[in-house]
Image (tube, rainbow, N blue to C red):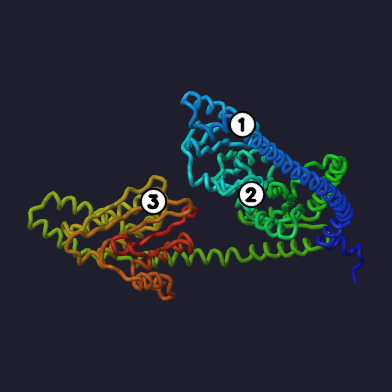
Amino acid sequence: MKGPVTLWRNSIFARVLLTFLIIILPLYFGGMSIYNWGAQTVKNEISRYMLAQVNSYLSELAHDIMRIETLQLDCLSDTDLNQLAVISQSFDDISKTKAVLRLQKKLFAIKSSSEYIEDVKAHIPAIERTIHAVEGISEISEDWYNALSDASFKNEPIKLRRENLLILSIAYPRQSLRTDRKPVFIIEVELSEHNILRALKRTDPYDGTGALLINTSLGMKLLYDTTGQAAETIYDILLTKLKSSNNGTFQAKVNGKPYLAIYSTSEYTGMTLCKYVPEGQVFAPLYKYQIMFWLFTAAAILIIFLFSVSTKRFIQQPLSKLVDAFKSVETGNLNVHLEHKYDDEYWALYRRFNKMVDKLRTLIGQVYAQKILAQKAELKQLQSQINPHFLYNCFFNIQSMVVRGEYESIGLFAKQLGSYFQYVTRNAAEDVPLKKEIEHAKIYAEIQAKRFRNRIALEFADTPAEISGIIVPRLIVQPLIENAFEHALQNKLANGLLRVYFIVESDFMFICVEDNGEDLTDEDILRMNKKLEAEEAFIETTGIVNIHKRLQLRFGNDSGLRFSKSESGGLKAEMVIPLNKHE
C-alpha cells in the first residue's frame, strides 16, 4: 500500500488537488464571510436610503398637489372670474377682453408654480368659453365640462386621468353649496405624467435601476427602466404585494438577475411608488471595505500565482513536452524519445509513446508504402475505364460537313478533334491544372453540340483565376457533359441548354454541370446519389462513378459528386473539391 508521500510524488492529480485545497480553502471561507457581512450591511443601508427617497418623493408630490389645490381655491374668489361667470352680459367687448386677459395671467401664475403642470383652464359656461393659461381661449366642450362637473366633487385630489394627464378640478359653487344646477365655472389643472416621470428620474443615482409610479383606481402606470427588462416583472409582483401591504421591500429575479425593490403608497394621492435596483449595484458603495478588498485581491493574486506555478511544473511542462513530440512525429521525425523522472501517469504515457514510435518505424516501410502503391494502381485502373463513346459520331459529322461544303468548319472541327484525342490519350501526367481540364471539357462539348446543330446551347463560365491552377485528376468533367448529352439532351428538339459554372467558397470549390432535360423525380435523384455510395459502385464501369471514386481517392471522403434538380427541371451535378487539400 502506498503511503502519503508516495501518492504525492506519483500522482499528478493528487498533487494538484491537494495543493489547491491547502492554499485556497482557508482564504475562500474567510473572504466569503467578509463578503456576506459587507454585502448585507450595504443592502440594509441602501434599502433604508431607497425607502426614505421613495417617501420623500411621494411627500413632495403630495405637498405640491396640496399647494395647487390651495391656488385653485384662491382663484374661486377672483373678481374677473366671478364677473365673467355671472354678469358677463353686462360687459362690453373691451371690458370682457380685459377681464379675460387678467384671468389668463392668474391662470398662468398657477401654471408657473409647479413643473408638473401642463396647463390651467377656467371653464365658463356663461361665455361658452374655456380660458387657458397657455393656449389662449377655446370653445367649451360640453361633454368634458359635464365630466368635470361630476368629478369635481370627489374627495380624491386627482379627479380624472386623460391622455397621460392627471386632472385636478374644483367647481363653484363647492360641494357644501351644491344644488342640482351645474357649476357656474370650473377651474381645471392638468398635471403632465411626463413631467412627473422626468422629476422622478432625477432622484435616481444608480445605474441599471428603474421606478414605477402607479394609481390603480385611475389606471395610471408610469415607469422607466434603464435596462428595459425588469419593469413588467416588478409591476406584476408589486400588484400582488399591494393586496397585503401598502409599503415594504421585496426581491425579484429577471432573466436570472436579482433585483431589490422598495415601495410605498401615499394616503393623500393614492399613488404607489416602487423603486428597484440590481442587487449587484448595492456593492458599489463598499468604500469602507476598500482595505479588506485590496488585501483579498492580493491574496487572490498570490493564490493564482502559486497555483499557476504548480500547474505549470506538474502538468503544463510535461504535457507541452508530449505535444511537441507528437508534432515532431507528424512532420515525419520518428527518432523521438521521451524521458520523465517521476514514476507517475506521465511516465507511463511517455513509455507508451516511445513504444508507439518504435512500432511506427517498423511498419512504415511496409504498410504505408504498400498502401500508397495500391491506391495509385487503383487510380490508374479507374482512369483507364473512361473511353470515348462518340468517335463514330465525329466521322458522321465530318462526312455531313463535306457534303454541305463547310470546308472552314471541317478545319476547325478537325483541330478540335485532334486536341481532344491528344488530351485523352497522353499518359505523361495523371493530374492536370483545372484550367486545362475545363478547356478539354469545353472542346468536347462543342464537338458534341455539332451533332445537334441549333438544338442545344452551351454556356461555359470562365474559370475563376484563384482556382484555375488547382491540380485535379484528368477527365473528371467530360463524363458529366457526356452524361448530359446522352441522357438528358439527346431527345431535345429545340431550346436545349447545357451550363458549366463554378462556385468558390472559403473551404470548398464546386464545379456545376446543369441541363434542362426531362424532369426528374426526387426518387430518381435519390437513387443516383445512393448509387455513388454503394459498395458495388467501386467496380462499376460508368464514367460518373469513376469520377466520384477518383475524387475521393485524391481529395478524401469530403469530396466527390452529388446530384440535385436544376432550376430548369433537369439534372444538376456538383463536383465538390476541398480547397485545403488541392496541393
Badge 3: residue crowd in 10 Å (few <14, some 14–19, many ≥20): some
Q: Earlier in the sequence, mark 1 or mark 2?
A: 1
**Label 2 belongs to which residue?**
154
Determine the CA span between mark 1 and mark 2: 23 Å
What count of labels does the image hold?
A: 3
Numbered circle sitting on residue 433: 3
Label 3, label 1: how far apart the Cα atoms are: 102 Å
Whether residue 549 is visible, yes or no, is: yes
Q: Earlier in the sequence, mark 3 or mark 1?
A: 1
* Amino acid at pointer 3: Pro
Q: Nearer the viewer, residue 2 or 273?
A: 273
Which of these two is toward me, 456 or 486? 456
CA gap between label 2 and label 3 equals 94 Å
Classed neighbour count for the residue bearing mark 2: other residues with Cα under 10 Å, few (<14), some (14–19), many (≥20): some
Q: Which residue occupies the foreground of this view, 94 or 193?
A: 94
The image position of residue 445, as x and y in percent, is 25, 57
Which residue is found at the position 48% from the left and 23% from the top? 94
Q: For mark 1, does the 10 Å Cα neighbourhood hold few (<14), some (14 to 19), or many (20 or more) residues?
A: few
* Position of 447 relative to 490 (above/below): above
Q: Quadrant of the N terminus?
A: bottom right
Disc number for residue 137: none
Q: Is residue 564 left or right of residue 107?
A: left
Q: Earlier in the sequence, mark 2 or mark 3?
A: 2
Q: Which mark is residue 78?
A: 1
Q: Mark 1: which amino acid?
A: Asp
Picture coordinates of residue 448 (x, y %)?
22, 59
Q: Secondary structure at mark 3?
A: strand
